[in-house]
Image (cartoon, rainbow, N blue to C red):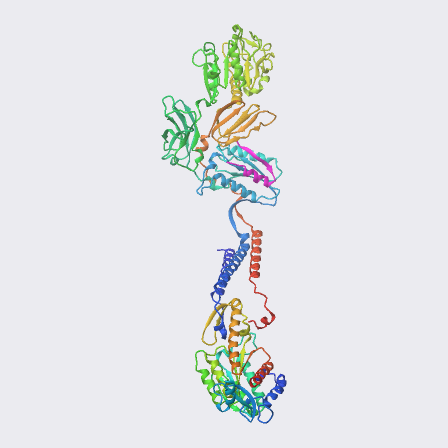
Amino acid sequence: MSFVVAAALAIAALIGLPVLAHLLRRSRAREQEFPPAHLVPQAQPVARQRRRIEDRALLSIRALVILALALLGATPLVECSRLSLDRSSGASVAMAIVLDDSLSMYAKSQGGRRRFDHALAGARELLDSARSGDAVTIVLAGAPPRLHLAATTDLEQVRRALGECEPSDRATDLSSAVKMARAALQRLPHADRRVVVLSDMADDPLPEGQPIAVAPLAQLRTAAPDCGIVQAERQGRRVRVNVACNTASASRDRRLEVVAQAAAPAGDGGQRVGAGQVIGDAPLEVRAGAQLLSLEVSQPLAAMDVRLTGGDALAEDDQLAVAPESAALMVAVIRDPSTSSVLTGGATLLEQALAALDRDIVMRPLGVLPDDAKTLAPFALLIMDDPPGLAAESRTLLAEWLARGRVALAMLGPRVEATQLGSTLDPFVQGAARWEKSESDGADVASLGWLGAAAESLARLEPQGRVLLASAAPQGSQVTARWQDGQPFALETAVGRGLALTTSLPASVEQSDFALRPGFLALLGHAIEQAELRAGPRRSQAGDSWTFAPSPSVTVTGPRGPLALQDQAGDSPEKVVSVANAGRYAVTVGADTHERFVHRAEREILKLPENPDDVAPASSGVAIKSRIDASADLALLLLVLLTAELALRFAKRPARRKPDADATAA
Amino acid sequence: MQLRRGLDWGTLTPLRITAKVVADGLYSGGHPSPRRGPGVEFGGHRNYVPGDDLRWLDRRALMRHGRLLVREFETDTDRALRLVLDASASMTYKSAAAPAAKLAYAALLAAALGRVALSAGDPVALDWIGGDERRPLPATGGREAFERIVRALEDARPGGDLRLDRTAIERALAPVARHARRGSVVVLFSDLLDLPDGALERFAALSARGRVLIAVQVLDPAEATFPFRGAVRLRSSEGGQIVETDGDSVRSEYLRALDALTATWRERLLAVRGRLVRCQTTDDPVDTVRSVLRAIEGGRQ
């Protein structure tokens, strides 16, 4: 025991003095001789009671005064476990707070408090130790990392910004977040820079670099057993569910249930189903890792949820909406297998190229363009390889379908000259297009910059011919690529909210090497992106952003209510919204309303926190223990207590006595 | 106990002149006496009290008025002064504001009165109520008598509990009743607080045979004003009674009880032509002796 501690204890022991004095005082009044005592009546109990109450009030105040004095003396020596900024010098500090708002931060500690709340409290403690002139920036580490607040010296603004932070179902991307934080500090003039990571560190190790990133909150890195539903999809009468468990214990004695989200009437031999009724279930395997469960449901419904029974440290990922099969982007491919297949047979080159893109799409090969809107409606993208022409009904149907925000890609070929009477290729080309021998060997790479590096591959296509688009370009169309001789290679024509893409070469290898080039894949990828942009991806991962083409009315309502759309960065007129939480979303674009589904990242559930020793470098400039200086508050308290005692004593003061009484008083 | 120390004889000088006026009437033939009693010259009637000499019962007045009246005459009487001092334990009380204990003040008054009486030629006797090693003095006169009285007072050792020793009053007043001659003046110095039941009646009975009874109630200022505040624990000097009380709330009640006690004595003494003088130890003793002399004069009229 140090001298300081002993002295503090000795001062604290003084609190017993007023108690002792009070006991001595109230034990018995001092006995005095008074001959006519038999003439004096006993005291009234009421007076005694009042005096007892007054004495207790005085005793309490005096004890508190001594306690406050002891605390006042000990204040500079008191330490508590809280975050603070260590300053080697008096200079201002630039600090980047990397706050993890990923799914794993929902996990609750033993005290029932979420990891995110601990992190938020740590951030506020750091702010409390910040001084005027310190610059603070906030970076959110849920994927993708975001700069929540640019560096500012307005600490109140930082506190408000912290109050707006909420955990989400995003994955963790600490590496990018730390890089973003360092970049945010780079422009600041402060010499002393800090990066503080408030995360459970359930991610890859922090990247090397300066300033050193420090993760001071070790209590966030305790393991939290958890099983979570990654995604769920309906396939016919079955529901395929991806479940991830970070420990085997978390999956013990747990089952997966499929429940009806809303009541459904009986039909097709099925019985009536009530809301919340379990229509299928299966047990989880007792093991850590990812599991794929396929559950047969008693009655397939349009709106179903899956949930995990039992409990774990993270209840937020134990339930998810089941996405319908059509949630993936539907792509219709109209091709002639006799001309576009490879010589060995099987899938056409176009279909193989779409599959090679590894995008979340469902491809449906079609022989001809559907002649009713209901059949065409589920598709977001229509790809036609060397179409022979479109009848009037088909053109009308296609125009209406495009106007609702769909994308069609027509890769024109020699058949443009074989269109039947009354058939045209509107809106891809206007009037009669002509197939001719190509005088150019390939596309102008400079005009294909929007395809990226793959554009180089289109420089030599060895075409047998090409469609002359220059004279057949529809009104309002835009040439997006050219041949090396300046002829249009590709066109884009806006139709309502939709887009019609036209190329002057087909996918057939008999006409050119176009389908064999990486640029072909890039072109298909562009078409898919345009389709996703308009129709939107029906399935996304938490943290993804949805971009909407300019539209008078776009609303997005998620599981936690409506989301606010924001302007796209730059001068783009498009609107963007970031979906942070998994679940079912209702998207309305004009008169068109559809559902989208957001799932979780499997890795976010499986990844356990890193070893604290590996992620908390010493001498990082952030101290976990801090000295508290509450002298001002204690001094004020002391003043208040002394005033209270004076007031109490004044109220209890004896009445002013007459002069003659003074002369005879004892 | 240094009696002479607190006595301002110079201040008593005008008192001595007044006392001499009173004392002059005490000697037979010296000057007309306001004293009524057996003699040769009719001095008036008064109501009969038990113990009066039946020789002076006025039969004619009885027949005329139907009341027992005693005839009085201006007479030469023995004007002996009998000083009775209460030396019980309660008389030793002295509060912080008091200059001396009650017994000391009473002794001062007694000595002053004795000197006045002796100066006038009246014999002075000294008796005690309570006290240890008390030394009563028979009625004697002359310059030496004053010295004896002072020594007796100086040697007094207060003590005793009158509330427990109920015969103390009887033992103290019996010699007085036996030796006090007609017309004597009996002055009792006491706080009257701890006297046992019946003390008042026993003292009033001394008024027979034309004796003048004067009770001087000597109080400490604390007893007269009850200056205690807040919670106090008071112990009686006699009787061992302990009272725990709140000074502020019981003051008026105590003072009423004290006044009632004093009033009882006053009224009872008035009924036997006696007087009560109440004083505090802080009072000027000259004024107090003057009050006593006036009371004596009033008792004789």
Query: Residue A81, position in %: x, y?
Result: 50, 46
What segment carries the magenta color? A143-166
Rendered location of residue A326, percent (x, y): 45, 22
Q: Decide if residue B79 is in sight here.
A: no
* Residue A415 rendering spot, x and y as whole percentages: 51, 8
Viewer-nearest residue: B67 or A268:
B67
Q: Where residue A279 sits: x, y (%)? A: 38, 28
Residue A655 lies within the magenta run: no
Which quadrant of the figure has residue B145? bottom right
**Quarter-wise, where is residue A442 in the image?**
top right
Numbered-mark total: 0
Judge whether A599 appears above or below A430 on screen.
Answer: below
Query: Visible in this render: residue A388?
Result: yes
Residue B294 vs residue A438, the one in the foreground: B294
Q: In this view, does A224 lie above or below A273?
A: below
Q: Which residue lies furthest to the front in this view?
A: B64
Residue B280 is drawn in which quadrant?
A: bottom right
Inspect the magenta stretch and tell me whether residue A150 lies in it.
Answer: yes
The quarter of the image holding the C terminus of chain A is bottom right
Tell me: residue A20, above or below residue A460: below
Q: In this rendering, is residue B168 above or below A132? A: below
In terms of depth relative to the viewer, which is nearer, B286 or B149? B286
